[in-house]
Image (cartoon, grey):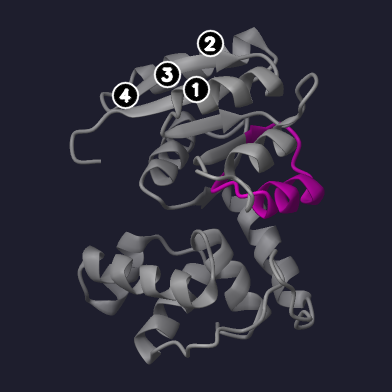
Amino acid sequence: MGGMTIRVLLADDQVTVRAAYRMILDSQPDMEVVAEAGDGRTAVAEALRLRPDVCLLDIRMPGTDGLEATRLLAGPDAEHPLKVVIATTFDLDEYVHGALRHGACGFVLKDCSPALLIEAVRAAAAGDSLISPSVASRLLRDLASRPPARPRRRGPDTPPPQEPLTPRERDVVAMVARGLTNDEVAATLHVTLSTVKTHLGNVQRKLGARNRVEVAARAWQHGLT
């Protein structure tokens, strides 16, 4: 992040969970927890007021739940979308798909390691995405088993790109769809990290994807892997 501090908002209805997250994140030299919320409505209000770099949200919260809060903060209709990472106990497909559909750029389970939680927050702040490995593998298997979707105006099932991808962009997409990080893609293709990021930026524009999670979804749906 080039020496910048990542400002994080925490939202969970359990005080002990928020305290644990704060301890983990505040221990990092490049992170600062700037607000906490015990329910979704407060989380949305504080996020819109403070505009943190990353919002770390639970799903099951009183009133406005984490999925609706994600839609309001990061969804297609959000005027100035924020980066949202979901952290939940419940490893349910409906939650995963709902979170990603509403614009979340990360999804981790509460029993993940502190290192993975930190990595998910850093990835979101950098415009990247991270999903817990067990969730990601199931998500990609599900996408791979689906037939090509009918075109829709917006959402996870979208038409193929109108502007064709270059051979190198297809290489990058295939690796992203299999869960490789930008560093791993760069090492495999023997190119610089900035080159990979440039290719991903072009791919996101051509596919109409907001982040690498949506890039992976488009790749599986349209046979780009």
**Residue at the image point whose x is 39% and y is 91% from the top:** 167
Nearer-N-terminus badge (2/3): 2
Secondary element at tag 4:
loop
Q: CA distance from mark 4 to mark 1?
A: 24 Å
The magenta segment is 87-106
Secondary element at tag 3:
strand
Q: CA distance from mark 2 to mark 1?
A: 22 Å
Looking at the image, residue 21 sits to the left or right of residue 149; the answer is left
- Of residues 88 and 71, which is closer to you in this image? 71
- Residue farthest along the front direction in this orientation: 79
Secondary element at tag 2:
helix
Q: Which amino acid lies under the numbered mark 2 shown in the image of this protein?
A: Ala
Q: CA distance from mark 1 to mark 3?
A: 15 Å
- Residue 68 in magenta stretch: no
Q: Are marks 4 and 1 in contact (CB under 8 Å)?
A: no
Disc number for residue 19: 2
- The relative height of residue 3 versus residue 186 in the rendered view (above or below) is above
